[in-house]
Amino acid sequence: MKFTTASFREAKERGEKITMITGYDYSTARLEDEAGVDAILVGDSLGMVMLGYDDTLRVTMEDMIHHSAAVARGAENAFVVTDMPFMSYQTSVYDAVVNAGRLIKEGCASAVKLEGGVKVKEHIRAITDASIPVMGHIGMTPQSVNEFGGFKVQGKNIAAAHRLIEDAKAVEEAGAFAVVLECVPAELAAHITKILTIPTIGIGAGADCDGQVLVYQDMLTMYGGFKPKFVKRFADVGGAMQSGIKAYIDEVKAGTFPAKEHTFKTDDETLQAINDGRI
């Protein structure tokens, strides 16, 4: 059954955890969808894990639309949320609505996600007024990495915790159907989850959030040597891929692949003509 914004709300009401994972292409989305994940996030993290950038700031609307449409084609039941990239909404409320509309119309997303709380309250309200579902994102917001001075945990003191609570309330009041809490102390995330009526999706925010999201390259050990503290590696897909690629290289160089069972035959008349040198 297709997961929807109503499914997010109903899951929180029933106390059922929501599962979310990133996806950036058709084949991966198919695998995730068939595994039964509730939602797929087409994150601007694709800038780092798919395009090789050092951060998410270089990702464009065209990048997001391209990857989002591919994921949407592979997600039969999973709810597709697509990130609004850096400077696609910060410039004005008008730009926010226009670009959110492009992600829905051209990127085939079910909803959009944008970073920030109080500062983007009017943006969220305008987008939702245009009948576009919005997922908020507060805490460690990667698009603000230069402002933060790096990827750092947010809300570690009273003043910072108060700001995060105000951000969470602002996102909810503006009409978002859910909010991501990234790199937030577990106790604070649990408190925010309790006071909000919309679901919280945690990433580095403890087990008391209403759901969890991870970058699939991190959880499947496919991306680099660095492992964030909040990541659990559920499989060594990267190691399996490297082993398979090495085996392929070895067999090609040894001449053992392709073997007879991997080749096609011609008919006897054509074979005879080849052997006789007539063709």
Image (cartoon, grey):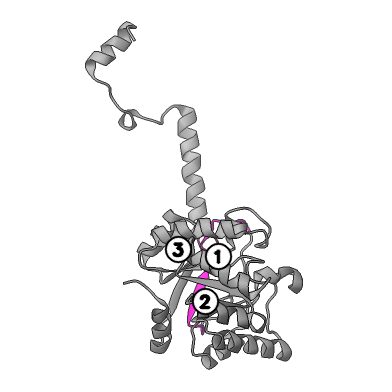
Task: Look at mark 2 in the image and give the residue it sits on.
Answer: 134
SS of the residue under disc 1: loop
- Look at the picture and state if 262 lies above or below 193: above
Residue 108 tag number: 3
Residues tagged 1 and 3 counted as in contact (Cβ below 8 A): no
Check the picture and name the quadrant holding the C terminus. top left
Whether residue 277 sits left or right of residue 83 in the image: it is left
* Secondary structure of residue under mark 2: strand
Residue 14: x %, y % from top left: 38, 88
Which of 182/67 is in front? 67
Relative to 252, is 100 on the left or the right?
right
Number of the label disc, if any, that sits on residue 193: none
Q: Position of residue 225 (x, y in %)?
A: 62, 57
Amino acid type at mark 3: Cys
The residue located at (42%, 84%) in the rendering is 9
Amino acid type shown at disc 1: Gly
Boundaries of the magenta span? 208-225
Q: Are marks 1 and 2 in contact (CB under 8 Å)?
A: no
* Label whose residue precedes the other's in the sequence (1 or 2): 1
